Image (cartoon, helix red, strand yellow):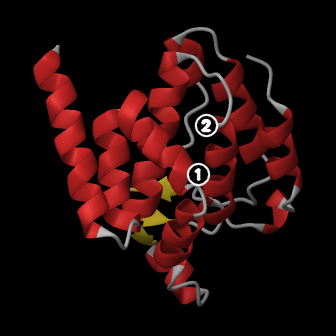
């Protein structure tokens, strides 16, 4: 899949080179990694563009993770290959479940976790769509972390369980 306009627009919003990345350099290469994930035709091609270690490393979030949440949400509005969708939803879960990397805390970015969750809430409708038709379990796990409506989370857990039982 070619990178869709909403994804390009979201990527273009940020000066990625000014954002800290887990690899120790500026994050100017992150848009290219997203492009490679979205354009990959095989799982092997996509695995070659892993964003792990750039946005998050062993649960520790880096500054580039916050705008990456918006990029993932923009990508979820588009038709995606199954492997790209699974990868992006799982990556989103890691970003909303993460904590600031100690190096980011030293830079005064001790709230990256809350910023990622707040940004993910902006795409609540997309996450709900995933919970009923896409990467169900992971999307429900994301809901559990970002949704302030505990009853909704439980409703979607029950809905997913009924769908699994019906198979």
Which residue is at 71% across, 59% downward? 25
Viewer-nearest residue: 8 or 99: 8
- Asked whether, in this view, residue 83 is left or right of residue 147, the answer is right
Instruction: Look at the image and tell me whether residue 66 can be seen.
Output: yes
Which residue is at 44% across, 61% downward? 96
Point out residue 110 in the picture as x, y percentages from the top left corner. Answer: 50, 85
- Asked whether, in this view, residue 116 is left or right of residue 71, the answer is left
Point out residue 51 in the picture as x, y percentages from the top left corner. Answer: 57, 42
Q: Is residue 154 above or below residue 148?
A: above
Point out residue 143 in the picture as x, y percentages from the top left corner. Answer: 36, 57
Q: Which residue is mark 2?
A: 76
Q: Is residue 139 above or below residue 78?
A: below
Label disc, if present, on residue 68 of the rendered structure: none
Q: Which residue is mark 1?
A: 54
- Asked whether, in this view, residue 51 is left or right of residue 59, the answer is right
Looking at the rendering, which quadrant does residue 132 occupy?
top left
- Asked whether, in this view, residue 67 is left or right of residue 84, the answer is right
Local crowd size for mark 1, using a 10 Å CA cut-off: few (<14), some (14–19), many (≥20): many
Label 1's element?
loop
Q: Is residue 158 above or below residue 14?
A: above
Which residue is at 71% across, 19% downward? 39
Q: Mark 1 or 2 closer to N-term?
A: 1
Query: Label 1 vs label 2: CA separation?
Result: 20 Å
Which residue is at 49% across, 56% downward? 56
Looking at the rendering, which quadrant does residue 70 occupy?
bottom right
Q: Which quarter of the rendered picture does the C terminus lie within?
A: top left
Point out residue 90 in the picture as x, y percentages from the top left corner. Answer: 41, 41
Q: Is residue 26 above or below residue 161?
A: below
């Amino acid at each position: 899949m070619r990178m869709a306009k909403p994804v390009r627009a979201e990527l273009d919003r940020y000066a990625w080179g000014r954002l800290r990345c887990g690899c120790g350099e500026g994050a100017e290469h992150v848009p290219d990694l997203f492009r490679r994930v979205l354009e990959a035709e095989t799982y092997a091609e996509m695995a070659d563009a892993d964003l792990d270690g750039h946005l998050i490393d062993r649960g520790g979030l880096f500054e580039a993770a916050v705008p990456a949440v918006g990029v993932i949400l923009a990508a979820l509005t588009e038709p995606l290959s199954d492997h790209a969708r699974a990868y992006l939803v799982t990556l989103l879960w890691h970003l909303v479940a993460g904590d600031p990397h100690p190096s980011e805390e030293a830079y005064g970015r001790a709230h990256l976790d809350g910023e990622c969750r707040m940004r993910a809430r902006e795409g609540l409708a997309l996450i709900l769509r995933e919970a009923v038709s896409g990467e169900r379990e992971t999307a429900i796990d994301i809901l559990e972390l970002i949704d302030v409506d505990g009853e909704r989370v439980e409703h979607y857990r029950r809905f997913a369980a009924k769908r699994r039982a019906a198979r």
